[in-house]
Image (spheres, rainbow, N blue to C red):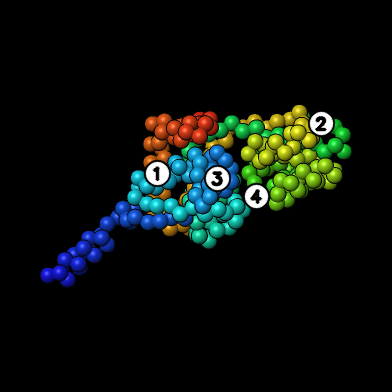
Amino acid sequence: MKKTIQLLVISLVALLPKHLLAETFTAHCRNYPPELFFDGSKCAGVLPDLVSDIFTELGHDINWAYVPWVRSIREAKKGNVDVMIRHSMTPERKSVLKPITYGYTIRHLSFYKSPRFRGDITSYDDLEKVNIGAIRGVFYSPRFSVLNTRTLTLVGKTDQLVAMLELGRIDVVVTSASHNEELFDTRFEKATFVDTFLNPVYISIPLNSSAIGIYDDVAQRMLEYRKSGKVDTYFEKYGVPAPQQIFE
């Protein structure tokens, strides 16, 4: 009798939809307070709280790991990470990630000039004629991503750009509030031109992730959070302006 009951339980569990079975998924965290940051061994901030609550409501847990963005993309291609948070989208990323919008922000892309650079930048036409410094693997703006520049110098860290701009090894550097603009603002002259655009922001589940099976559930729950105003409460908790909510 006992064996029959055990077999019955196993059979019932096997028939349950996969999204109803509790799983623990891996998510990557970076240091971008107050939206996301590590507090000791815990990933905290607006988006970790938001994402963790959604997954908890769906019956799943998240194990957070501190991983730089460039490495996260590599791991996403291999299916070694299940959730990516706070990012924009590029064609390269879209080939790896299935995105979920959590809002829209107004972004301002700025350009700072080397002390040795004579002149100004007033348009993208001007940018095409100079040597621009940027961080490798970073999304700056839709227009900048297709810029046909004479020379684009890519490096791994912001402090490298600061040093190169000071020495005149690059003419201008591209940056924004999301890319440590404050490190340039106090030391270099800002160009006249500013690229302002509406930027959708996402969390994503990699296409090769084991979590892709619950993508629709996560996306639907996020949409409900957005429409009800619940997304805003997570930003308000940390004193951060909430993103705009635009629905097509």
Q: If you read the primary sequence from the N terminus, does the residue marked by circle 4 or circle 2 appear first?
A: 2
**SS under mark 2:** loop
At numbered mark 3, what does the secondary structure look like: helix, strand or loop?
strand
Callout 1 secondary element: helix
- Discs 1, 4 touching: Cβ within 8 Å: no
Instruction: Give the number of the mark in front: 3 or 1.
Output: 3
- The x, y position of residue 12, in whole percent, is 22, 60
Local packing at callout 3 (Cα closer than 10 Å; few below 14, some 14-19, many 20+) is some
Q: Residue at x 45, y 42 (%)?
A: 49
- The structure residue drawn at horizontal position 80% and vertical position 42%, both measured from the top left corner, is 165
User: What label sits on residue 169 in the rendered view?
Assistant: none
Label 3 to label 1: alpha-carbon separation: 19 Å
The amino acid pointed to by label 1 is Ile
Do callouts 3 and 4 mark residues in contact (Cβ within 8 Å)?
no
Q: Say which mark, if any, is on residue 120.
A: 2
* Residue to which mark 1 is pinned: 54
Is the residue marked by circle 2 packed among few (<14), some (14-19), or many (20+) residues within 10 Å? some
C-alpha separation, residue under disc 1 versus residue under disc 4: 29 Å
Sequence-wise, which precedes: disc 1 or disc 4?
A: 1
Q: Residue at x 49, y 52 (%)?
A: 64
- Give 98 or 81, whichever is nearer the viewer: 81
Q: Which mark is residue 137?
A: 4
View extreme (left): residue: 1
- Labels in figure, total: 4
